[in-house]
Image: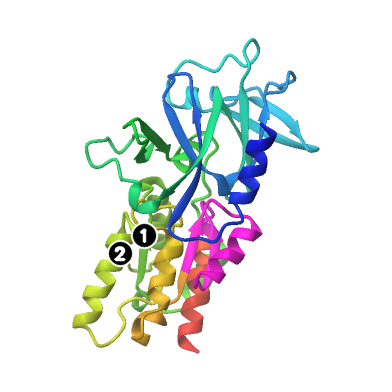
Amino acid sequence: MENMLDEISQRANLAFSNQMEMLTFFLTDKQQYGINVFKIIEVIETPKEVTQIPQTSPAIVGAIDFRGKVVTVIDISIALNMQPVNYSKELSYIIVCEYSGMIQGLLVSQPNKLITRSWQDIKSPGSSFQESAYLTALTYEKNGDAIQILDIEKILSEIIGADDIIADDILAKGRQVDISRFKILLADDSKSARNQIEKTLQQLGAPFESFDSATAAFAHIMQIYESQSSPPYGLIISDIEMPGMDGFTFAKSLKKQTDTRLSSIPIALHSSMSNESNRLKAIEMGADDFIPKYQANSIATLVLKWLEKSDS
């Protein structure tokens, strides 16, 4: 386990090149799942002491003391309607992660291995999956075995909740400006994340277009700019983790365009990987801004900030 943690740390410092550094793990269905190592703080054995928390979701098995902090532990198997992990009688593990500025513990049966995949080799599950499904992407082993990448953001938002109402003072500020002319392009493969951003933009009265991949968004932008002389978008908000093309590559691809109508569009990366190191890496890759997911006030403040900059 120590070697795995060392390797996670080393891989988290690699330069971004449209690749996903992934830790695979098993749940109680014995299927293999994957999570981006950039979200992982540490992988630990489930401690003997897990404090029960009354009146919470059945998927919240309790809380643990992690480096002096109380961390909520969520059994992903329960969240997916599987048999729970029998952590009190069997060896199990907790993947301690940071999502949108909060530390969470994901209870799993067994971590497996670290692998690298190009985002081009990570595929959307397609429309055959119901919109309520928790699968956001798929990739495969050389022998054909599937690795399922879960929409952890959706799981957490349903279990813990999401902040989707803009504060009154921010809304009042938005009413003082003409936001209807400030069109926003949104790219995110998670339907729950798109819905949350769209709800925020609707509260502001900001026009927008949504895409479920950076690949589709980039192609649309290039096509539009061939036929229009003025830039149609005042701001782009993009997820980082997406099949085909990640947000870092999306930002870098736009900023390297010789056409200043394209390279000058502000792009903000919007991610559950919300720690300071990821914000700095986003800026290094060409993004103009960075905000954590599931914070309506942050999204609204971002939009108003770049609207104000566009007027100056």
Q: Is residue 202 magenta?
A: no
Q: Residue furthest right?
A: 68
Assign a secondary structure to mark 2: helix
Assign a secondary structure to mark 1: strand
Task: Name which residue lies at 33% across and 54% down.
Answer: 244
Q: Is residue 11 left or right of residue 195?
A: right
Q: Position of residue 250 (x, y in %)?
A: 39, 66
Question: Which colour assignment does the render follow?
Answer: rainbow
Q: CA distance from mark 1 to mark 2?
A: 6 Å
Task: Name which residue lies at 54% across and 61% down.
Answer: 15
Query: In this picture, is 65 found above or below 20?
Result: above
Q: Is residue 69 left or right of residue 164?
A: right
Give the mark, 1 or 2, whose residue is nearer the N terminus: 1
* Crowding near the residue tagged with mark 1, few <14, some 14–19, many ≥20 C-alpha atoms within 10 Å: many
Q: Is residue 157 visible?
A: no
Residue 187: give its label: 1
The N terminus - image quarter: top right
Q: Which residues are magenta?
A: 268-296
Residue 205: give its label: none
Residue nearest the viewer, comparing 308 with 243: 243
Q: Is residue 202 visible?
A: yes
Q: Position of residue 199 (x, y in %)?
A: 40, 55
Residue 217: give its label: 2
* Crowding near the residue tagged with mark 2, few <14, some 14–19, many ≥20 C-alpha atoms within 10 Å: many
Q: How many marks?
A: 2
Task: Name which residue lies at 38% across and 68% down.
Answer: 206
Do tag 1 and tag 2 residues touch (Cβ < 8 Å)?
Answer: yes
Q: Position of residue 159 (x, y in %)?
A: 52, 33
Q: Is residue 277 magenta?
A: yes
Q: Residue furthest front?
A: 142
Q: Is residue 102 left or right of residue 240?
A: right
Query: In this picture, is 169 found above or below 244?
Result: below
